[in-house]
Amino acid sequence: MFYLMRLPALVLVACLLWAAGQTTGCSSKENRYPEDRARFVKIDKAVEELRNAYSRRDLSDIQGLMLPREALDKTTNEIQQDFQTYQEIALEWTIDRIVIEGETTEVVVNWAGQWRKTPDDAGTRERGQGVLRWAGQKTVLLDGLAGDLPFGMALRRAGEPPRPGPSR
């Protein structure tokens, strides 16, 4: 009788040990593509560094993420104009997709931002989608831009007619 009472406990312990062995077995699988994963992590980090540098209004950090190209000089000037015009910039974006072809990586981002000339200013809110083109594998640097990106908001707003205010 004593052995019959211990049997369910032994079965329970055996089942728990088997389940624990299955769980630890799954977690020990190694990454099948470590180079690809490392590249995606570098790209994600570079995209986030660009967003943070723009929100902090840090032109030198932005230039450190760019390849020295004439095509990016216009963007640098637009960003500099944003920093001179707006005291506060709040920018959020999410990566929609990443396309890697050889040394080139295209990152499609959806963004939303707010630009304020003064802390009391209601600000300008905009959103859009654009493409950040990155080059390199070991070091990832911005190589080009396409689509509707948040950079150059001051020049965009300067070209628009003033919005009508409330009538008095």
Image (cartoon, rainbow, N blue to C red):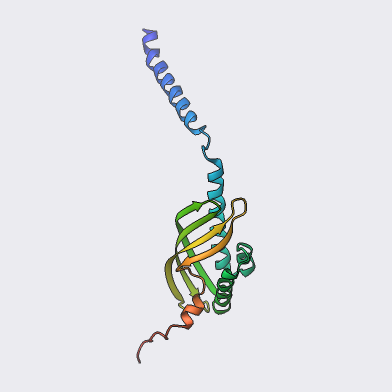
Q: Residue at x 43, y 73 (%)?
A: 125
Q: Is residue 125 left or right of residue 68?
A: left
* Image vertical order of residue 30 relative to residue 155, above or below: above
One can see residue 73 in this view: yes
Can you tell which quarter of the image residue 84 is in? bottom right
Q: Where is residue 165 shown, x and y percent of the image?
A: 38, 86
Q: Residue furthest top?
A: 1
**In-front residue for pair 30/138:** 138
Q: Residue at x 61, y 63 (%)?
A: 67
Q: Residue furthest bottom?
A: 168
One can see residue 121 in this view: no
**In-front residue for pair 45/18:** 45
Q: Where is residue 134 shown, x and y percent of the image?
A: 55, 58
Can you tell which quarter of the image residue 58 is in? bottom right
Quarter that holds the N terminus = top left
Q: Is residue 81 left or right of residue 167?
A: right
Q: Where is residue 132 shown, x and y percent of the image?
A: 51, 62
**In-front residue for pair 126/117:** 126
Q: Where is residue 140 shown, x and y percent of the image?
A: 59, 55
Q: Residue at x 56, y 77 (%)?
A: 81
Quarter that holds the C terminus = bottom left
Q: How many marks?
A: 0
Q: Residue at x 52, y 40 (%)?
A: 33
